[in-house]
Image: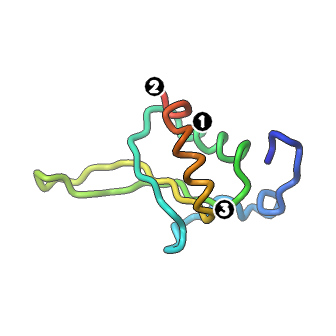
Amino acid sequence: MLKYNQINPLNVFGMRRVAHCPPHFETLVFDIRTQEKNLTDWVYENLAGRFYFGDHFYTTDGGSVALSKMIAFEEHSELSYFGLFLDTINHG
């Protein structure tokens, strides 16, 4: 965690944020109200495991396609911790 000046090997080798969402990651879909950088910076500062952050497309009841954001964590406990702070981080 960057907060405690600990070096994370996943950060050093650029393997912390993954480009696709593996099936074993636990996901959370939400509407974004802030900049993506604010959310990812919080993850880098407060959590230690691998994560995915990207777009989530879904079909509405009316048949149109809508867009939300999805974040996923390899460590399921990190998703719980992020979810507790989401309203604090994701403010408009």
What amino acid type should be assigned to the residue bearing mark 2? Answer: Gly
Which residue appears at 77% of the width and 62% of the height?
A: 10
Distance, label 2 to label 1, CA atoms, is 11 Å
What amino acid type should be assigned to the residue bearing mark 3? Answer: Arg
Q: Which element is circle 3 on?
A: loop
Which residue appears at 88% of the width and 49% of the height?
A: 6
What amino acid type should be assigned to the residue bearing mark 1? Answer: Asn
Indicate the position of residue 91 as horizontal and vertical percent values.
48, 28
Distance, label 3 to label 1, CA atoms, is 17 Å
Q: Quadrant of residue 79?
A: bottom right
Q: State the residue lying farthest toward the bottom.
A: 23
**In this figure, which residue is indicated by the disc labeled 3?**
50
Which callout, 3 or 1, points at the residue further toward the start of the chain?
1
Of residues 46 and 19, the one nearer the viewer is 46
Q: State the residue lying farthest toward the left.
A: 62
Indicate the position of residue 38 as horizontal and vertical percent values.
60, 36
Q: Which mark is residue 79?
A: none
Q: How many marks?
A: 3
**In this figure, which residue is indicated by the disc labeled 1?**
38
In the rendered view of the protein, which quadrant contains the C terminus?
A: top left
Mark 3 packing: few (<14 Cα in 10 Å), some, or many (20+)? some
Q: Which element is circle 2 on?
A: loop
**In this figure, which residue is indicated by the disc labeled 2?**
92
Q: Quadrant of residue 33?
A: top left
Relative placement, left or right, of 66 versus 38 is left
Which callout, 2 or 1, points at the residue further toward the start of the chain?
1
Which residue appears at 26% of the width and 50% of the height?
A: 66
Indicate the position of residue 34 as horizontal and vertical percent values.
49, 32
**Dots 2, 1 in contact, CB < 8 A:** no
Which callout, 2 or 3, points at the residue further toward the start of the chain?
3
Q: Is residue 26 above or below residue 64?
A: below
